[in-house]
Image (spheres, coloured by chain):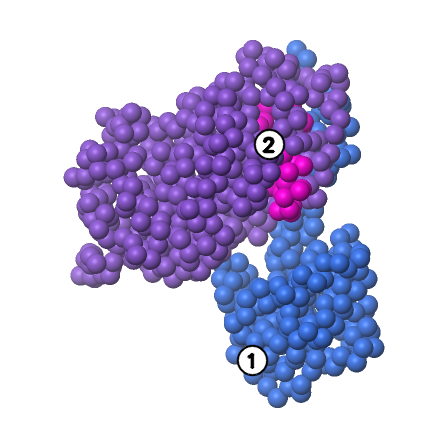
Chain colours: A blue, B purple
């Protein structure tokens, strides 16, 4: 009896050039062949490991010294990853010790806030490269930078507490995005003008998929710098700002 | 407002109203904890379930979970309640209804008769007293058949939505996934694309692409781009080839407002789609998607547990005689359904409750990467749903949706299920598969020839 081995589906292979979807992967009986099954498992394993990865506090603190800005280490109200995944409300709030450490901050323009989010791996690997492009641009344009903060078990909105605690006019949250099967290392950048507790997503601008194989550091920095400049010029961020950013040429 | 109480070992459990009782009686899930409506101990949960079992069904017609004056879905539920259908079960309590549903005397025909007499809240309530096994056994007895260009929901048949999504809506990329899917017997429920952008021009070109393909190969199925209902309405008026009108719906008026919809808008789109008269053997023209947690995520749950909110969305769906209703169960994330156990339970509830209310239920058997779930959980759920008589699941290349970034079921998963349970595609589609040389007359897959017409498509 002749068996349907993947090679017999060779005619379908030609379709693969048109899409990154997992098409023309063959079959054994009605099932997915082992090679493709293991490839999928590996991609999922990378995503799962990213969700449970931890912020490299010491490594990042050391590397951030190159920018000659103070670095603060903060933590949300979340106790552990299991709670983080089930209680997004707690991930949006700083714990008491962190709130106290922000007292008496001098006024600043931009607070850069590095948050683990759903992929600390993404933040560990891709924030320094981005900041090496972005920070010199911001400094050249005379934006006063607040201390850089490193935040564990945080969600995007925790930047509102931190930005206002640091007396900053704008918060820039760099956070690990929910890992996809082919992208466990995406950083998202969220800008909020006049950050204060209680804001919602419509007050922010988001730039997604920042990673070497996605939106490059250089392109991401260019876009972030443009949005920060516009936010200061118009004294706002969010939906109203987004509309005018669409004409940017990337 | 009714008050409820139950005593266990001298401890008195009080439940201030029906809404509270339903929340406390719900099997544990993270979304109800996030909403602060779940039981605080294992004992309290069972106390609530024991209490709920004694609540007469008639009480649900007076004690509504969201006020009649405040919510158009409550008004729909109360105003469309069918007293005649209800008469067969009106003397029962929630607990007695559970036993009645499972009894041998209650057959497919009886269940069809009472569908219009059940309200979403009664249905949600009884499901909270049912184990997974009960949810499967009762759903299995239901049969909800719908038609457009083929017949979906017949016992012994099992369909799939071919979901050929692409991150940039590239027509050739979409077409490649459609061809791969068709050659894997997928697409009898619908060929349905989630567009990357909701721009009318982009949606229109995808509709035309699929319509051309369907005509060229005389495929007995329907196509759909899952754009916002206002976009679809606009495209209908512009003469685009719209087979089905899609919309995501939720179980409270406020949640639907956050989706940019209301009953009047859905009615308008329903009538517009009907007027196109494109169905050949039936006129079920609506495709709805739902999912537990949507009301809470819009801050529009009014203290009602997420499963009861979900079943209230089915009241919206059934008003418009849909071809397909799909609960996208694991898409919303672990703050609503934490792990495989919670996702599986929720899917079986949604499927059973939808079927009891007379809906053609399918399930997007799925999860995100931050949920405690994997393909093994999906295999379990898929198999349970096949046994329960689910109308359709998704068919996605390799189970990996590269546009929406989540994992669902593959073309292969549906082939597996049909094989192990002896299920067949929609009859008209099955004949087409045989004619195309994709399967033999017994339904076995045939090797694909390089000369197959589907491989020669030019897009």
Residue B241 got which mark? Answer: 2
Residue B186 at x, y percent in the picture = 58, 27
Q: Nearer the viewer, residue B21 or B130?
A: B21
First to last magenta residue range:
B179-207
The quarter of the displayed image where residue B134 is located: top left
Q: Which element carries disc 1, helix, strand or loop?
A: helix
State which quarter of the image contains the N terminus of chain A: top right
Q: Secondary structure at mark 2?
A: loop
Quick check: can you spot residue A106? Answer: yes
Q: Nearer the viewer, residue A219 or B34?
A: A219
Picture coordinates of residue A202, whole percent (x, y): 58, 64
Looking at the rendered structure, which numbered label has been put on residue A99? 1
Question: Does residue A42 appear in the picture of this structure?
Answer: no
User: Is B263 on the left-hand or right-hand side of A8?
Assistant: left
Q: Is residue A14 magenta?
A: no
Q: Is residue B196 magenta?
A: yes
Q: Residue at x 72, y 58 (%)?
A: A246
Measured Cα–Cα span from mark 1 to mark 2: 57 Å
Q: 10 Å neighbourhood of mark 1: few (<14), some, or many (≥20)?
A: some
- Residue depicted at x 49% and y 45%: B248
């Amino acid at each position: 009896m002749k068996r349907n081995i993947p090679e017999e589906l060779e005619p379908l292979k030609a379709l693969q050039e048109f899409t990154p979807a997992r098409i023309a992967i063959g079959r054994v009986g009605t099932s997915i062949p082992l090679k493709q099954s293991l490839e999928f498992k590996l991609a999922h394993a990378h995503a799962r490991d990213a969700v449970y990865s931890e912020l490299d506090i010491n490594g990042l603190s050391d590397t951030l010294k190159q920018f000659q800005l103070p670095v603060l280490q903060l933590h949300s109200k979340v106790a552990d990853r299991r709670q983080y995944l089930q209680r997004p409300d707690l991930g949006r709030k700083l714990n008491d010790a962190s709130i106290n450490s922000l007292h008496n901050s001098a006024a600043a323009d931009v607070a850069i806030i590095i948050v683990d989010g759903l992929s600390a791996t993404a933040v560990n690997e891709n924030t320094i490269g981005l900041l090496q492009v972005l920070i010199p641009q911001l400094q050249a344009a005379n934006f006063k930078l607040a201390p850089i903060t490193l935040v564990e078990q945080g969600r995007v909105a925790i930047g509102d507490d931190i930005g206002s605690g640091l007396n900053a006019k704008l918060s820039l949250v760099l956070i690990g995005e929910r890992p996809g099967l082919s992208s466990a290392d995406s950083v998202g950048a969220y800008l909020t003008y006049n950050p204060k507790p209680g804001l919602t997503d419509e007050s922010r601008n988001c730039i997604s998929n920042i990673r070497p194989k996605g939106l490059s550091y250089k392109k991401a920095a260019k876009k972030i710098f443009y949005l920060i400049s516009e936010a200061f010029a118009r004294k706002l961020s969010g939906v109203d700002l987004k509309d005018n950013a669409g004409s940017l040429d990337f | 407002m009714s008050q409820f109480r139950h005593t266990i070992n001298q401890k008195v459990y009080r439940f201030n109203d029906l809404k509270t009782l339903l929340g406390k009686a719900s099997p544990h899930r993270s979304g109800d904890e996030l909403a602060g409506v779940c039981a605080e101990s294992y004992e309290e949960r069972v106390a609530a379930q024991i209490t709920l079992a004694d609540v007469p069904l008639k009480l649900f017609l007076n004690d509504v979970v969201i006020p009649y004056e405040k919510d158009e879905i409550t008004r729909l539920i109360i105003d469309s309640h069918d007293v005649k259908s209800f008469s067969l079960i009106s003397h029962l309590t929630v607990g007695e209804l559970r036993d009645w549903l499972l009894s041998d005397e209650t057959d497919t025909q009886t269940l069809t008769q009472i569908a219009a007499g059940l309200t979403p809240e009664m249905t949600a309530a009884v499901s909270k007293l049912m184990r997974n096994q009960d949810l499967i056994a009762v759903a299995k007895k239901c049969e909800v058949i719908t038609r457009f260009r083929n017949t979906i929901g017949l016992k012994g048949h099992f369909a799939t939505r071919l979901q050929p999504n692409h991150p940039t809506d590239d027509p050739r990329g979409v077409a490649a996934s459609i061809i791969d899917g068709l050659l894997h017997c997928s697409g009898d429920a619908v060929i349905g694309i989630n567009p990357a952008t909701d721009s009318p021009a982009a949606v229109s070109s995808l509709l035309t692409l699929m319509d051309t393909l369907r005509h060229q190969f005389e495929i007995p199925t329907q196509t759909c781009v899952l754009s916002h209902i206002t976009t679809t309405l606009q495209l209908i008026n512009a003469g685009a080839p719209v087979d089905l009108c899609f919309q995501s719906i939720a179980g409270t008026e406020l949640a639907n407002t956050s989706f940019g919809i209301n009953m009047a808008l859905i009615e308008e789109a329903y009538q517009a789609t009907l007027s196109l008269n494109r169905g050949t053997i039936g006129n079920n023209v609506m495709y709805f998607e739902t999912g537990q947690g949507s009301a809470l995520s819009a801050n529009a749950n009014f203290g009602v547990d997420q499963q009861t909110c979900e079943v209230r969305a089915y009241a919206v769906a059934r008003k418009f005689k849909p071809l397909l209703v799909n609960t996208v169960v694991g898409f919303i994330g672990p703050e609503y359904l934490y792990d495989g156990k919670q996702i599986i339970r929720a899917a079986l509830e949604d499927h059973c409750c939808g079927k009891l209310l007379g809906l053609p239920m399918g399930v997007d058997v799925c999860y995100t990467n931050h949920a405690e779930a994997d393909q093994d959980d999906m295999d379990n759920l898929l198999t349970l749903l096949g046994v329960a008589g689910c109308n359709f699941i998704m068919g996605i290349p390799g189970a990996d949706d590269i546009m929406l970034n989540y994992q669902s079921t593959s073309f292969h998963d549906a082939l597996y299920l049909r094989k192990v349970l002896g299920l067949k595609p929609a009859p008209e589609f099955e004949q087409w598969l045989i004619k195309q040389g994709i399967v033999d007359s017994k339904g076995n897959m045939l090797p694909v020839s390089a000369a197959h017409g589907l491989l020669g498509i030019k897009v």
